[in-house]
Amino acid sequence: MTFSELQARVSVSPATLRRDLSELEKSGDVIRVHGGIMDPAYVRSEVSFDERLVKNRSAKASIASVASQLVPNGATVLVDAGSTCLEAGKALLGRKDVRIITHSVALLEAASRGEASVLCLGGELRKVSGALTGGAALGALNSINADIAFIGASGLEPDWGCSTTDLSETEMKRAFIARSARNILLADFSKWGKPSTIRFAAWREFDSWIVDKVLPVGELKVLRDCGVKALHCTNIQVKPIGLIHK
C-alpha cells in the first residue's frame, strides 16, 4: 500500500502514521519501501508449512470435512501437500474403502495410524512445504489414474486462475490435474484476489472449489462461466460424487 492509501484508511495525521510505521517496521510486521509499505510474508514469497497449519485453522477444518464427504467408496484420491489438503487427507485415513496417493510428508506420517490404503510418491523433500517433488514423483504419477484430486493453492485470482510459489510444486499440481478424473480445489477465501508467483491451472481445469465463505455474485459468475461449482462449506448437503474409473 502507498503511504497516502494507508493514511486514508486509518484517518490519522502523517506524523502519527510515520511513528506507527516505524514501530511496526521494528517489530517486523511491515516492510517500509519508498512511498509505502509491503507485507513481509509477500516479500519472502512463501511462509513455512508450520505457519500455514495454524492460519485459518477452523476454515481449513470445515473445507476438509466437506471434501472428505464427497469421496465415494472405492475411490482413489490424489492428495496435494498443502495444509488444507492435509486436513482432508487425514479425514480419509480412517476409511478402509479409499486409496490415498500423496507426496505430503505430514500425511504419510499420519497414515500409520489410519485404515486407508496409502501410496507414497517419493521424491526430493521441500522442507518449507513438506512436499516430495521432482522426477521420481512425477514419473510415478505417469502410471496412475485417480478418481479425485484434492489440490491446494497459494493464490487465487479471478482472471488468472490458481497459483503457487515454487516451480517443482507447480509441476506436481499440474500432474495431479492431468491424472485425475475430477479436480477439486481446497482453499479458503483469504487467498482470493492474491495471486502468487507461478500459475499452475486455469479455473476451467477444476470441477469444484470448496471454500469457507459465500462468494459474491460477481465471483460466482466468473466461476460458473468456467464450469466450476463453488461449494460453500457450511449449511450444504454433501453427497459422494460418482466414480468414472472403475
Image (cartoon, rainbow, N blue to C red):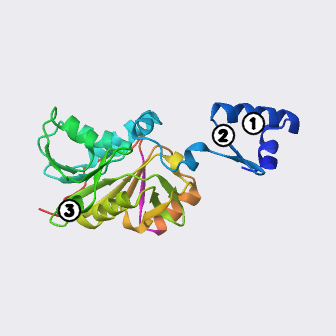
**In this picture, residue 149 sits left or right of residue 203:** left
Residue 155 at x, y percent in the picture: 49, 54
Q: In which quarter of the image is residue 209?
A: bottom left
Is disc 2 in contact with disc 1, using a CB cutoff of under 8 Å? yes
Q: Where is residue 216 in the image (x, y as percent from the top left)?
A: 57, 53
The residue nearer to you, when weighing 34 against 47, is: 34
Q: Which of marks 2 and 3 is nearer the N terminus?
A: 2
Residue position marked by numbered label 1 in the rendering: 21
Q: Does the magenta stretch include residue 58?
A: no
Classify mark 3: helix, strand or loop. Answer: helix
Residue occupying the point 44% across, 67% down: 202
- Mark closest to the chain's N terminus, 2 or 1: 1
Label 2 element class: loop
Q: Mark 2 points at which residue?
A: 30
Return the x and y of residue 172 as percentages of the image width and height: 31, 60
Q: Distance between the residues labelled 3 and 1?
A: 48 Å
Gap between marks 2 and 3 measured at Cα: 41 Å
- Lower sequence index among marks 3 and 1: 1
The stretch of residues the image draws in magenta is: 226-232
The image shows residue 163, relative to residue 127, as above or below, that is below
- Tell me the quarter of the picture where residue 97 sits: top left
